[in-house]
Amino acid sequence: MTSISLLVLGLHNCGKTSLADGLCNNNKSRYKVPTIGVNSMYYYGENQTLSITDMGGSLWNREFWSLYDNSVDMILYVIDLSDEAKFADSVEVLNFYILKTKSDRRKPVYIIGTKRDICTRDIRYLQLINHVIPKIQSINKNHGCYFMCVDTYDQVDIDVLRQSIISIVAQKKAQEDKSLYCICDYIFPFKKLIGDGEG
């Protein structure tokens, strides 16, 4: 069974917990208590286990985001498409978070626009597609940037997102395994030749 570790980040009250609950098939109520600190949850599928860490989005909580990002396979960054007032701040926080993260610690970033069911304007969606996503892709080019707009209470949306996450992470891990194999294939015969020469 494959285990995938995810870190859910975003501003306060943007829909992080609803998204995490949805991915774990646990969205039974639309009333959510804001996350203070860290909340962990799990999804057990037939062939995959998702370990999801949902972190608070307040200014104080953001100071601790970097303590958790090195041990995960992917960052899920949540942006509330229905909140025009916080949209610019959300994008700025994402830019700052990725830029301050050392390149060797960066992970694939999946930007998830939430609350599309109550978002009455498409302008923020277009801003994400035309401006935000290309910029993040440029900054995080060696690790990847992905985007999906979802209703966290729509099971079809959640199932598609979950499968997308699993596929992307599996592909990334396969690439890493292939690179490791190539490195080992190069080093070990080289050592063997040195040993033969000494004998």
Image: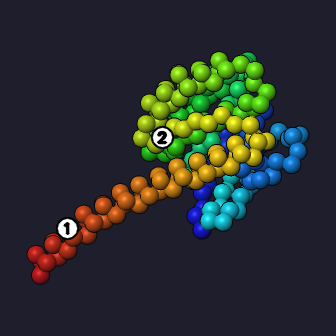
- In the rendered structure, which amino acid carries the disc numbered 1? Phe
In the picture, residue 81 is in which quadrant? top right
In this rendering, would 80 be left or right of 140?
right
Observer-nearest residue: 35 or 43? 43
Q: Is residue 159 left or right of residue 169?
A: right
Going from the N terminus, do you reach mark 1 or mark 2 first?
2
> What residue is shown at x 58% (from left), y 53% (from top)?
166
Pointer 1 residue: 190
Q: Which residue is mark 2?
A: 144
Instruction: Tell me the element at label 2.
Output: loop
Please state which of residues 111 and 35 is positioned toward the viewer in this rendering: 111
Q: Nearer the viewer, mark 1 or mark 2?
A: 2
Type of residue at label 2? Gly
Q: In this image, 109 relative to 138: left or right? A: right
Residue visible at 73% across and 30% down in the picture: 116
Q: Label 2 neighbourhood size at 10 Å, few (<14), some (14-19), many (20+)? A: some
Q: Could you tell me residue 39's position as x and y percent?
A: 76, 49
Q: CA distance from mark 1 to mark 2?
A: 33 Å
